[in-house]
């Protein structure tokens, strides 16, 4: 019998069985070894004959970090623990999480959820490549899967129109949805086509095109076969919005206790859950409600007009006079309720009911008369006010604010999203939460769960070579407000210009705010082509520009669309400069959030509500440089506070080890120049001429 030979799928180096058992990783490039004749299972003992292993497709690369993730996540699921992993870019966490869960689907289903659609294609690709015979369905919004959608309609208008068109199918009354009607008439054909899409693991848009060519509604057809699929993929709403989750579980034919849950980019989940519990009302909606009373008669119309007048004059018009742009004030819901009682004779909740009931009448009238829009502004105002007066517990704050465009907005904001996240994560059959940066892990655990027991926390090392990155912190500048002088602005300018002169390849400079960026930008002198983040700037345009040459500089903000959730492929970005620490604006909401967290987690309010979100935005921005093991580049942080022990310890471990302090723009430039010279011209990046 010929002894098995193992081979590295990446570089082709071959190893004996003994060498494989000693390490299992290529000594040259660190890739997991596979049998020369095909795939190899992953198991703790390293025994290729073990039936407990997870088989991979031939030639599939598995890294050491992936094996560590699979082992930790699998053990957590086995022991009934929630698993939270902070796994830097390159860990391969998407594949690892799938390999931890898929072998368990004999007695459950898998729900994969993410904040935005950009993560969807990664999982679809991995599921197809694994070839495990699973059936998977992924949804984006119902409107985006509809071949009849109107580009100009709002999402609410679309849902109302969809509901009406489906209802009209029953009586063949125009207008009706021919795609939905065909499903009613040829359900078996639609079902066969939907199951084929699930077996092929098609994307939502691929599914929509395929189904609509055959005349079927993709959303309804795929919904009809959910009880036979193994994996469902969608945004956070499908897992954490109670109404949407209930509908999904009903279609899947399971309880939450039968579902394994993978939550990607989980650092977004605390803010998402707070947003889900929050609500807001704009002056535009109130103005629409007032105009609505001029069209639709009702016996309570005088009362409706009185309520709207109080809301318009005493809240919105007054706020318009006293608030500046981007300003906000705290509002006591009891005071507003008393105002309704004083001026109208009933308290706030009763006034809200009056508006809500009138809105219901308007909706019914619109529907009966065949209006294109079934929406009612008064219904929306009443719905908001019911929320506003009902949510008075300490975990809510009531605000009136004016945004940057000068619009007045009335809000009720949640300070604690655990009532959304805790029941889901605890009741699921197993939960894996992960992100490229989910640190400090104990903070995110506390923000998502009421109890600390039954949770496994793991931070994984960056798999990228440390020699490919340079991390610098300037020790003589700070974005602290009291130090933001003309001298400090000048020092920042000197640092930025020094980096732009010596760095090889494209540079991104990210600021703490648009105000700071626009203050400093006119004074920066450079020969590079300047690209400035604007509201209408498209990601694809910026990527194309950076790919065209290495002589560009991108100016943007931390927390903006170019510093988070975007990949810069093929090392087209070789340096990030972070100007300051991106703390949230210090206002009444931020103070309330810190105060609330201090009560929930004594002495930790600033860490949970202020420092941790700032570090997250910083690390997200810095992470744009290194997207693969071959990427080389520099990270420059222009704020000395990052070196303070209480802040530094919140950074990823490799940041803490590798970060060097520089005390002048000249020293910064020397470090960057030496870094690039160390590659002796072998760097793949395009050098600045």
Image (cartoon, rainbow, N blue to C red):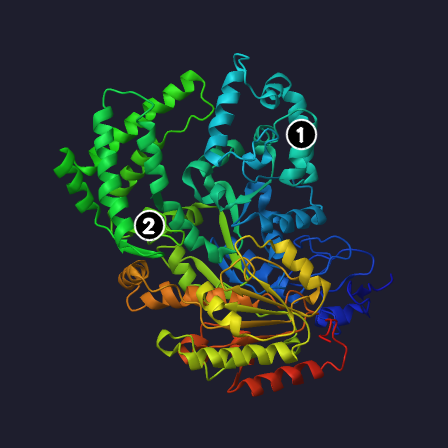
In the image, residue 367 sits, relative to residue 39, either above or below, namely above
- The secondary structure type at the circle numbered 2 is strand
Is 81 placed left or right of 463 in the picture? left
User: Which quadrant of the figure contains the C terminus?
Assistant: bottom right
Residue farthest to the right? 2
Circle 1 Cα neighbour tier, 10 Å, few/some/many (<14 / 14–19 / ≥20): many
Q: Position of residue 422 (x, y in %)?
A: 39, 50
Q: Position of residue 334 (x, y in %)?
A: 18, 45
Q: What residue is pinned by disc 1?
A: 211
Is 431 placed left or right of 4 in the picture? left
Total numbered labels placed on residues in the image: 2
User: Which quadrant of the figure contains the N terminus?
Assistant: bottom right
Which residue does the image show at 15% across and 42% down from the upper left? 338
In the image, residue 138 sits, relative to residue 636, either above or below, namely above
Res 378 seen here: no
Observer-nearest of 664 and 133: 664
Q: Position of residue 358 (x, y in %)?
A: 29, 26
Is 21 placed left or right of 233 in the picture? right
Single out the mark in the foreground, 2 or 1. 2
Q: Position of residue 465 (x, y in %)?
A: 66, 74
Circle 2 Cα neighbour tier, 10 Å, few/some/many (<14 / 14–19 / ≥20): many
Q: What residue is pinned by disc 2?
A: 413
Observer-nearest of 353 and 114: 353
Observer-nearest of 431 and 375: 375
Res 31 seen here: yes
């Amino acid at each position: 019998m010929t002894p098995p030979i193992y081979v590295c799928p990446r570089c082709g180096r071959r190893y004996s069985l003994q060498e494989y058992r000693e390490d299992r990783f290529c000594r040259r490039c660190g890739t997991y070894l596979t049998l020369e004749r095909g795939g190899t299972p992953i198991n703790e003992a390293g025994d290729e004959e073990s039936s407990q292993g997870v088989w991979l497709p031939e030639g599939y690369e598995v890294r050491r970090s992936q094996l560590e993730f699979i082992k930790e996540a699998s053990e957590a699921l086995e022991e009934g623990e929630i698993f939270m992993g902070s796994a830097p870019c390159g860990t391969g966490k998407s594949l690892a999480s799938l390999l931890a869960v898929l072998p368990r689907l004999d007695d459950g289903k898998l729900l994969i959820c993410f904040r935005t659609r950009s993560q969807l294609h990664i999982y679809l690709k991995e599921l197809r490549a694994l070839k495990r015979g699973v059936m998977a369905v992924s949804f984006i919004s119902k409107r985006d899967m509809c071949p009849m959608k109107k580009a100009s309609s709002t999402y609410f208008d679309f849902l109302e129109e969809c509901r009406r068109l489906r209802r009209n199918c029953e009586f063949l009354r125009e207008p009706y949805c021919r795609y939905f009607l065909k499903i009613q008439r040829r359900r078996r054909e639609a079902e066969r086509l939907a199951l084929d899409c699930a077996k092929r693991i098609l994307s939502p848009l691929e599914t929509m095109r395929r189904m609509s060519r055959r005349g079927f509604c993709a959303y309804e057809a795929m919904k009809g076969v959910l009880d036979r699929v193994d994996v469902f993929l969608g945004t956070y709403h499908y897992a954490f919005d109670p109404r949407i989750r209930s509908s999904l579980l009903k279609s899947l034919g399971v309880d939450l206790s039968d579902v394994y849950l993978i939550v990607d980019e989980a650092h977004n989940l605390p803010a998402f859950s707070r947003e889900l519990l929050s609500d807001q009302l704009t002056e535009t909606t109130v103005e629409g409600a007032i105009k609505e009373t001029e069209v639709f008669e009702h016996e309570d119309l005088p009362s409706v007009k009185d309520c709207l007048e109080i809301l318009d004059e005493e809240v919105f018009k007054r706020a318009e006079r006293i608030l500046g742009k981007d300003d906000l004030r705290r509002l006591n819901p009891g005071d507003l309720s008393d105002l309704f009682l004083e001026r109208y004779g009933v308290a706030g909740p009763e006034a809200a009911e009056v508006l809500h009931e009138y809105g219901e009448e308007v909706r019914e009238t619109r529907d009966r008369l065949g209006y294109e829009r079934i929406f009612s502004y008064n219904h929306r105002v009443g719905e908001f006010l019911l929320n506003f007066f009902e949510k008075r517990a300490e975990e809510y704050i009531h605000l009136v604010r004016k945004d940057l465009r000068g619009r007045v907005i009335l809000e009720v904001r949640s300070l604690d999203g655990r009532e959304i996240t805790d029941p889901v994560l605890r009741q699921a059959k197993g939960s894996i939460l992960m992100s490229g940066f989910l640190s400090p892990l104990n903070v995110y655990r506390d923000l998502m769960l009421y109890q600390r027991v039954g949770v496994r926390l793991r931070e994984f090392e960056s798999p990228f070579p440390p020699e490919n990155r340079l991390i610098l912190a300037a020790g003589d500048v700070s974005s602290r407000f009291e130090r933001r002088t003309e001298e400090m602005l000048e020092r920042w300018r000197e640092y930025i210009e020094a980096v732009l002169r010596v760095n090889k390849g494209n540079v991104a400079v990210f600021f703490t705010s648009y105000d700071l960026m626009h203050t400093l930008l006119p004074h920066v002198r450079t020969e590079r082509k300047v690209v400035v983040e604007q509201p209408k700037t498209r990601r694809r345009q910026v990527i194309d520009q950076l790919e065209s040459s290495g002589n560009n500089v991108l100016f943007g903000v931390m927390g903006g669309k170019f510093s988070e959730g975007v990949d810069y492929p093929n090392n087209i970005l070789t340096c990030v400069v972070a100007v300051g620490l991106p703390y949230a604006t210090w206002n009444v909401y931020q103070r309330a959030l810190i105060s609330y967290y201090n009560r929930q987690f004594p002495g930790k309010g600033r860490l949970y509500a202020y420092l941790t979100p700032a570090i997250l935005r910083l690390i997200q921005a810095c992470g744009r440089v290194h997207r693969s093991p071959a990427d080389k580049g520099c990270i420059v942080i222009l704020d000395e506070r990052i070196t303070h022990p209480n802040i530094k310890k919140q950074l990823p471990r490799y940041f803490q080890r590798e970060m060097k302090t520089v005390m002048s723009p000249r020293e910064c430039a020397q470090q960057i120049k030496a870094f690039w010279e160390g590659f002796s011209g072998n760097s793949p990046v395009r050098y600045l001429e």
